Image (tube, rainbow, N blue to C red):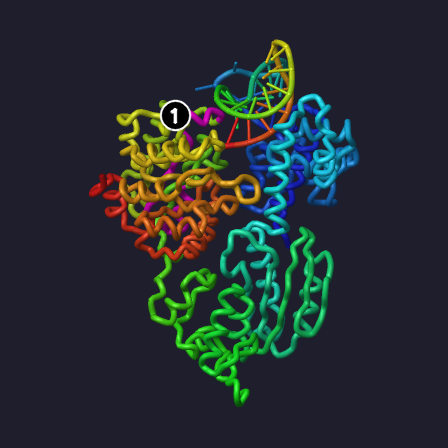
Amino acid sequence: MTRSNEEVEALLREYADLLLITGGDAFKARAYEKAARAIGGFPRDVSELDAKGLREIPGVGKSIADKVVEYLRTGSVPAVDEARAAIPAGVRQLTAIPALGPKKAMVLYEELHIASIDELSDAIHGHKLRDLKGFGPKTEENILHGIALMQAAGDRVPLNVAMGVADEIVAELSRVTGCEGCEYAGSLRRMKETVGDIDILVAADESVPFMEAFAHLPYTAEVIARGEKKTSIRTTKGLQVDLRVLPLDSWGAGLVYFTGSKAHNIRIRAIAMRHGLKLSEYGLFDSRSGERVASRSEEDVYARLGMDWIPPTLREDRGEVEAALNGHLPELVTESDLRGDLHTHTNLTDGLESLEEMIAAARRRGYAYYAVTDHAPKLYMQQMTDEKILDQREQIRDLDRGRRGMRLLHGVELNIDVQGDVDWPDEFLEGFDLCVASVHTQFGLGRDEMTRRLLRACENPNVNIIGHPTTRLIGKRPGIDADLDAVFAACARTGTALEINAHPDRLDLSDENILRAKEHGAKFAVDSDAHSTLDIAALRYGVGTAQRGWLTADDVINTWPLARLRRFLRKEGHS
DNA sequence: GCCGTTTTCGGCCCGACTGTTTTCAGTCG
């Protein structure tokens, strides 16, 4: 089943949005948002809790606890149903457009009866918004831009959403009698940042039981196609999932074929042809005799083509075929190479959990070191002060003292202002073990100014990592406009690492930017940017992205032993 | 609606930026 925490979170968020759209008490809406976030990041399954247990979650009081219990028991909450009845679902969708919030959405609905993105688009092109109070030409332009951005993302879903569904389906189908292998393939296996549909492969002699089980999964909303070799469903969340069952002796060939990418497959099929072979999802065959020469495992297939096995994250036809033919594939960084996390938050700022809880979770992962980097004062809403962060440092030093195993680092996530300066002067920054510095404001700055801004941050002797360097939000906000090559070169020169922020909405730097930055000789930090203990596990998406950027462990500073990391943080050997 | 070294009311994450106004509302981080 889908995780009930996520469903409850979605319900409470929806209610909060509806309250805001209808002009309800903003503080009440915020209370629901806060509770939604707390439940979404709560490390235990809320369906196991009663009202009393729920109220122990920070931000959840009597009213919300009762609603959650009601929802878990009956699947609906009267107050939410009433709000839904008052406002068409399309109106809430409008608020997902960047630059369009609840107030403007409500005006559009009340004045023009606009209740969908398509209707809004038509109204703008028909110049219907001009006469509305608070709307002008610039607003129209911003809304259209926001819509274009959303449509560019299309029906693709974030990597973590697809992974969650795929992991569950694989677990489910692996339990079916006769299963000799089950794995997800496609862009998900290649760890692309967004996924259009999910491909699942099963190895078995008899396909019927799998097709049957698949069509009756609890979150199957619709069976799109059903056959002997392939069945397609749509989940309740609208995601298409294809299942293919193949015999065990075609497993490797099937996995290669369905993992793709298309460009990669075209390249290796051409190589097969040159060897007098033919490659399909059923195997590698001799063109003349039709005899199957390899198919059982991916390694067999690649080996018969004279190539090393290529990790799925590299299969984009970006030179991996040549490298595999020459035996020059990189030894990619893996999740188990990571010795620590260098960008994390606690509830001192916008994290959900305490310092102790975050540290305990990190310790369970077996890290050698762990950095706490809460927000700095200029992200005003977090209300950080000198005193608060120095108190936190004392706590961290106390917790670190005399402990064996994981070491604690005290850091901060600074804000890079328009000039490229950060929150504190050098003498204060020197007290931190490391500083992450990120852009959180003024995303629309011109290219030259933006470049200067980032270069100045890189040249700050106390800045060690540029956090989420382009600040993009996948499907929501484009990255900033800057001369990234100049920034990457500056990072390499000054010993400033570029972050690969593993949050699935960011994955920033992206694979292509990583490839460019590596050319400049820059180093990287794969960080979770965790705001809860659950987020710490999102590191796998950062590692996937790093692999797609061809990174080895040596490229990633948080795979290094602490002593080497500390030398890097002191910028030894850099200008 | 939640919460309380100010406990049953009265605060609540604050400030900048943008585009629209002609003094400010809406949106965002």
Along the viewing direction, whichever of A241 and A210 lies nearer the viewer: A241
Q: Is residue A375 magenta?
A: yes
* Residue A291 in the image: above or below residue A330: below
Residue at 75% x, 36% y is A115
What residue is shown at x 43% (from left), y 56% (from top)? A548
Q: Is residue A60 visible in this depiction of the protein?
A: no
The x and y percentages for residue A169 are 61, 61
Kind of residue sitting beneath label 1: Lys
- Would residue A138 appear left or right of A427 to someone viewing this image? right
Q: Quadrant of the C terminus of chain A?
A: top left
Task: Say which element carries label 1.
Answer: helix
Q: Is residue A280 visible?
A: yes
Task: Classify 10 Å Cα crowding around label 1: few (below 14), some (14-19), many (20 and above).
Answer: few
Most extreme residue toward the bottom is: A289
Given residues A354 and A409, the one toward you in this image is: A409
Residue where numbered disc 1 is placed? A388
Q: Nearer the viewer, residue A358 or A482?
A: A482
Looking at the image, is A467 positioned above or below residue A187? Answer: above
Place of residue A185 in the rendered image (x, y in percent of width and height, measured from the top left): 54, 64
Position of the N terminus of chain A by quadrant:
bottom right
Does the stretch in magenta take in A280?
no
Image mark 1: chain:
A
Image-quadrant location for residue A91: top right
Please give left or right for residue A458 compared with residue A132 in the image.
left
The x and y percentages for residue A537 are 47, 49
Task: Give, as a single range, the part of the protein colored magenta.
Answer: A359-381
Residue visible at 23% across and 41% down in the picture: A574
Q: Position of residue A390 (x, y in %)?
A: 34, 27
Residue at the left extreme?
A573
In percent of the image, x 72 and y 31: which residue is there? A127
**Quadrant position of residue A456:** top left
Of residue A563 and residue A451, the one placed in the foreground of this image is A451
